[in-house]
Image: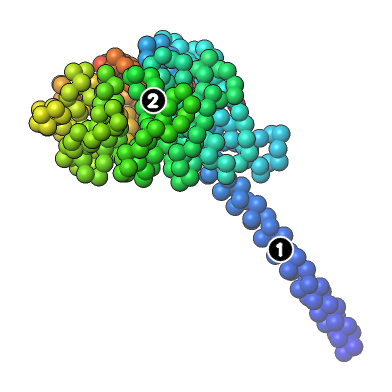
Amino acid sequence: MFENCAGLKTVLAGAVKELRLAPILFALLALLMGVCIATWTWSRRLGDLSFIAVCFSPDTRYVFVAINTGSFAASHSSTTPVIRQSVKCLDSATGAEIRTVSESTFPGPWQTGRLMGAIAISQGENKLVLGGPGGYLRILDPLGSAPPLNSARAGAESRITHLHVSPTGNLFAAMATLSPATLWSLEDASLQRSSGTYSSAFAFSPDGQFAAIGTTDGVEVRAMIHFEHIHTIQTDSPISIAFGVDNRSLVVCSPGRLRKWDFISNEVVSDIDGPSSQQVKLSHDGMYAVEYESVPTVWDFSSRQKRVLGTASDCNSVAISADGQLIALGHKSSAVSLWDAVTAKQLWSRNVDSR
């Protein structure tokens, strides 16, 4: 009987010991799960921050690329996320890298204001404009001088999605999410004008005398002198705008429709079916559009034909050369590809991630 009691006492003592250890074991397990979840969350956030923006030089000789990539740097602890950011100049004929304009590394996706989401270059090819989350704007020397020539901030809650440089070379327009279009000086990055209302699209006329702004009411046409409002073209949800080479026709792409106006007489010249997605870029003369919500597709409005550009569906940036002959695609996989707009033939593809 006493032997049984002793055995029971031993069992109870072991159980109590295990119960005492249980909170410690649970705490260690919770800590391990927390590290795994944090690592997975950072990986997802870093993946979301991977982005390429592309633009052509005015003479089409170069493709400028702004790239953000996220990773866990070997020089830091395995759970420290690092953002790599670079701007590169590629030869449009071969895809070969000509030079690195700028390059930097900084910790963590919480510094989103330093990321890049849009890029444009001046007509004189002497100013490169960058924009990103947090409304940050930067002006760089395309030849790679550092630090940035000038910088500014469009708004704390704004994410710069598109940039447009005036043909006159003294201004650029910044488009941001749920914000008015803003005009900035290329010389000192000072704010010059604001459209005052939410804007979804923007375009300068070829001669730089007019601007078209997509709003909730349609498309506002403004004279660049004093940014004076001329009239509003009534259309639904404009997502991309382009002026014709005659400086008086205006092509407006809305979901499912493409309309061409004579904005001087405010008369519709043509009205045809168009891309239905929200990710569309019109060529500079409005003769075709590239839809890139999934697999990039060229909509040729003169022939009423569509041409598919490959099979990749990870495109997040499109640039069209000034003459409309070439299309550059920036892919989330850190690749840039160049295509013939007429034949839909790929001319080259290059991975620009320097890791």
Compared across the picture, whether 295 is left or right of 125 comes to left
Q: Nearer the viewer, mark 2 or mark 1?
A: 2
Whole-number angstrom distance, CA of label 2 to CA of label 1: 58 Å
Instruction: Decide: few, some or many residues near mark 1? Use Cα within 10 Å; few <14, some 14-19, many ≥20.
Output: few
- Residue 146: image quadrant is top right
* Residue 217: image location, x then y, percent: 21, 44
Residue that badge 1 annotates? 27
Residue 334: image x %, image y %?
Answer: 49, 28
Q: Which residue position holds label 2?
A: 171
Q: Residue at x 58, y 31 (%)?
A: 84
**Residue under the point 33% across and 19% down:** 167
Q: Position of residue 312 (x, y in %)?
A: 38, 29
Viewer-side residue, 79 vs 19: 79
Q: Which residue type does callout 1 highlight?
A: Ala
Instruction: Tell me the amino acid under the disc marked 2.
Output: Leu
N-term-proximal mark, 2 vs 1: 1
Residue pushed farthest front?
226
